[in-house]
Amino acid sequence: MPDVLVTQRLVALFGVAVALLNFPLLALWDHDSHWLGLPLFPVALFAIWALLIGLLAWVVERSPEPAQGTR
C-alpha cells in the first residue's frame, strides 16, 4: 500500500512540475527586473528547479514505518 501512495505523490509532483515550467506561469518571471543583481528569470527557473528536486528527494527518500510484527 505505501508504494501506491509514493506513486501517487510522484505523479502529482510531475503534474506540478509541468504546470510550473510551462508558458503561462513562466511568463510571470520574464521581465527586466533583477534580484540581488541577477536577472529574475534565470533565478526563478533555478529556484523552481531546486524546489522540485528537493520535493522529489523528500518523496522518494521518505521510508514508511514498518508495520508492527513484521521485519
Image: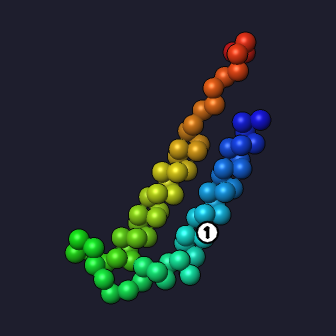
- The percent position of residue 49, horizontal first and vertical second, equals 47, 63
Q: How many marks?
A: 1
| Left or right, 26 with reference to 41 | right
Residue 31 drawn above or below residue 55: below
Q: Residue at coordinates 70% horizontally, 16% vertically from top-left?
A: 68
Label 1 SS? helix
In the picture provided, is 38 more to the left or to the right than 47?
A: left
**What colour scheme was applied to this rendering of the protein?**
rainbow
The percent coordinates of residue 69 (x first, y second) are: 73, 12
**Which residue is farthest left?**
37
The furthest residue to the bottom? 32
Taking depth in this image into account, of 27 and 61 the one nearest to the observer is: 27
The residue identified by callout 1 is 18
Residue located 66% across and 22% down the image: 66
Say if 39 sits above or below 18 in the image.
below
Q: Quadrant of residue 71?
A: top right
Q: Quadrant of residue 34?
A: bottom left
Q: What kind of residue is marked 1?
A: Val
> Residue at left 50%, top 78%?
26
Quadrant that contains the N terminus = top right
- Residue at the spot 56% in from the left edge and 81% down from the top edge: 24
Relative to 58, is 15 on the left or the right? right
Would you say 45 lies left or right of 18 here?
Answer: left
Q: Is residue 45 above or below residue 10?
A: below
Mark 1 crowd level (few <14, some 14–19, many ≥20, 10 Å Cα): few
**x, y percent for residue 21:** 54, 72
